[in-house]
Image: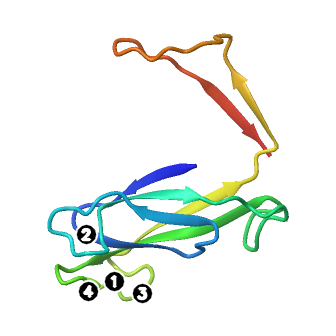
Amino acid sequence: TPFSLEAAPGCFKWSAADVSLVQVVRLEEAAGCPHGSSRRVQLVTRALAPGGCEGGRGKGHCRTMVLAVPVEGDGSEARGSASCFGDESLGCEVNVGLISSLSISTTTREMVAQDDEMQWLQAHGYD
């Protein structure tokens, strides 16, 4: 399932602590940002192993950190961001869990997207 993250102002190099759990995909090369950096990324979670992972909240739950480190115009790390959580670095914890069942709470069998009307679909995932 993809999720988007955005950081501003400036340009950032993004990384995931556990690449087996989350893939970080740059969404665009922002104007003025050096190659390999961006302001927006998409996180794509990967399938979990049946036993879960180390550092999770139990079987079927995993978590990792995604870091955004600011970069200068030449692509080097900005001052004050040498450590994982330096003055300028940003961190986002990503939690991933197995879903054993899914409940969709609606009586509508067909939903049609229209410009002038918003429709809601409520879903609950259970582990």
* Dot in front, 3 or 2: 2
* Element class at badge 4: loop
Marks 2 and 4 close (CB-CB < 8 Å): no
Q: Residue at x 52, y 50 (%)?
A: 2
Marks 3 and 2 close (CB-CB < 8 Å): no
Ranked by sequence position, the earlier of labels 2 and 4 is 2
Ranked by sequence position, the earlier of labels 4 and 3 is 4
* Residue 31, picture quadrant: bottom left
In the shown orientation, is residue 58 left or right of residue 87? right
* Dot in front, 4 or 3: 4
Q: Check disc 1 and report the residue beneath it.
A: 81
Q: Position of residue 84 (x, y in %)?
A: 45, 82
Q: Check disc 4 and report the residue beneath it.
A: 76
* Element class at badge 2: strand
* Element class at badge 1: loop
Instruction: Point out which mark residue 83 bears.
Output: 3
Residue 113 sits above or below residue 126 on the image: above
Q: Position of residue 28 (x, y in %)?
A: 29, 59
Tag 2: amino acid: Cys
Residue 86 sits above or below residue 120 on the image: below
Marks 1 and 3 close (CB-CB < 8 Å): yes
Tag 3: amino acid: Ser
Q: Position of residue 57 (x, y in %)?
A: 76, 63
Q: Residue at x 72, y 38 (%)?
A: 125
Q: Check disc 2 and report the residue beneath it.
A: 11
Marks 1 and 4 close (CB-CB < 8 Å): no
Q: Position of residue 39 (x, y in %)?
A: 29, 62
